[in-house]
Image (cartoon, rainbow, N blue to C red):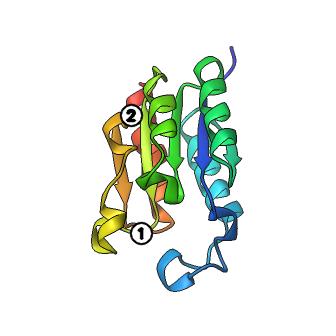
Amino acid sequence: MSRPTVLLLHGPNLNLLGSREPEIYGTATLDDHVQTASASAEARGFDIAHVQSNHEGALIDAIHAARQNHAGIIINPGAFTHSSWAIHDALAAFDGPIIELHLSNPDAREPWRRTSVVSPVSTGSISGFGGDGYRLAVEAMATLLT
């Protein structure tokens, strides 16, 4: 029997983690965070499939494909958090658990970052824990999948 997979989805500019605003996002790279999530998932009996794109349509395509291929979605939508109703709608069509993830705490930052169009279609949100948020998101997902 194959193990379930969870889609770990990253939006725009997150490919620059490690060098982009390290005072906010830390010095760990996107690959570092994916490795953290993958190791945590492995220990909990599922696998991670990772997609990062700076293009909204590519993220939507990945969410659509997840409907047939993945048990859940962990998404750090980047700036699309605040503006992409198209990602909101794609996530709303996904039947499994969805965890919104942010390295920083959007509520402690600029006022425009305090609006999330992803939260209303997410099972839950994890923010402000830096890279440890990936482990926390995987643990939450493991609980939701059992």
Which quadrant of the view contains residue 112? bottom left
Which quadrant of the view contains residue 122? top left
Residue 86: which numbered mark, if any? none
Q: Nearer the viewer's eye, disc 2 or disc 1?
A: 1
Q: Secondary structure at mark 1?
A: loop
Residue type at mark 2: give it. Thr
Q: Residue at x 62, y 63 (%)?
A: 14
Q: Quadrant of the C terminus?
A: top left
Q: Which residue is mark 2?
A: 143
Observer able to see residue 89: yes
Residue 29 lies, in percent from the top left, at 67, 69
Q: Residue at x 28, y 66 (%)?
A: 107
Residue 74 lies, in percent from the top left, at 51, 42
Classify 10 Å Cα crowding around label 1: few (below 14), some (14-19), many (20 and above): some
Cα–Cα span, label 2 and label 1: 23 Å
Residue 104: which numbered mark, if any? 1
Numbered marks: total: 2
Task: Work out whether mark 2 precedes mark 1 in sequence or the reverse, and give the earlier one.
Answer: 1
Residue 124 lies, in percent from the top left, at 33, 42
Classify 10 Å Cα crowding around label 2: few (below 14), some (14-19), many (20 and above): few
Say left or right for 68 vs 134: right
Q: Quadrant of the N terminus?
A: top right
Q: Residue at x 63, y 17 (%)?
A: 68
Q: Secondary structure at mark 2?
A: helix
Residue type at mark 1: give it. Ser
Nearest the viewer among 95 and 36 is 95
On screen, 11 above or below 4?
below
The furthest residue to the bottom: 23
